[in-house]
Amino acid sequence: MKKIIITALILVSALCGWAQNKVEANHGYWVVESNVNKPKIQTIRFYSDDAKLLYEETVNTGLNLKRKKVQLALNQISNKLYENKEYIEGKKLIALTFNIKR
């Protein structure tokens, strides 16, 4: 009886772990550049899968790239830009996403 219960628990835990491993498909990628002398000024560039520049913006505040929330927001912007597949000029997508004052 114990073997059946242990086997059932292992199967249930394996299935639950498998169901939670959803990975969102990311298209394109982003790069953040900053200067050592001026770390608060960052340039964020978004590229398509074939390394074509889709969007570029310079912000005057330091984004904490270690935060998962910031990475998720940049990934979402990258996916939206990838759907457009053309260079966008004059918009402030990063400033609007992170509520950065201009």
Image (tube, rainbow, N blue to C red):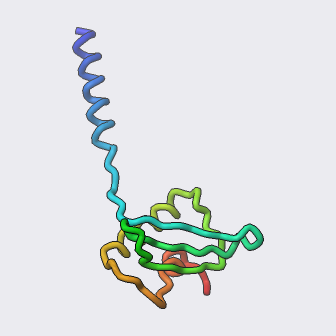
Residue at image position (44%, 76%) is: 53
Residue 19 image offset from top left, x and y in percent: 28, 42
Q: Measuring from the top left, give residue 69's x and y in whole percent.
A: 50, 61
Residue at the farthest bottom position: 90
User: Does residue 54 appear to the left or right of 35 in the view shown?
Assistant: left
Which quarter of the picture shows residue 14?
Answer: top left
Q: Please give the name of the residue rendered at 35% of the width and 64% of the height, measured from the top-left corner.
A: 27
> Can residue 19 be seen in the rendering of this structure?
yes
Q: Residue at x 36, y 69 (%)?
A: 79
In the rendered image, the vertical position of residue 71 relative to residue 34, given as above or below = above
Please identify the quadrant where the C terminus is shown.
bottom right
Residue at 51% over, 57% down: 68
Q: Residue furthest right?
A: 37
**Horizontal and vertical percent for residue 61?**
65, 75
Q: Is residue 22 above or below residue 77?
A: above
Question: Is residue 78 visible to us here?
Answer: no
Q: Quadrant of residue 84?
A: bottom left
How many numbered tags mark residues here?
A: 0
Quarter occupied by the N terminus: top left
- Does 6 appear above or below 15? above
Q: Is residue 12 above or below residue 2?
A: below
In depth, the one of 72 and 81 nearer the eye is 81
Q: Position of residue 24 (x, y in %)?
A: 33, 56
| Closer to the camera in the image, 31 or 3 | 31
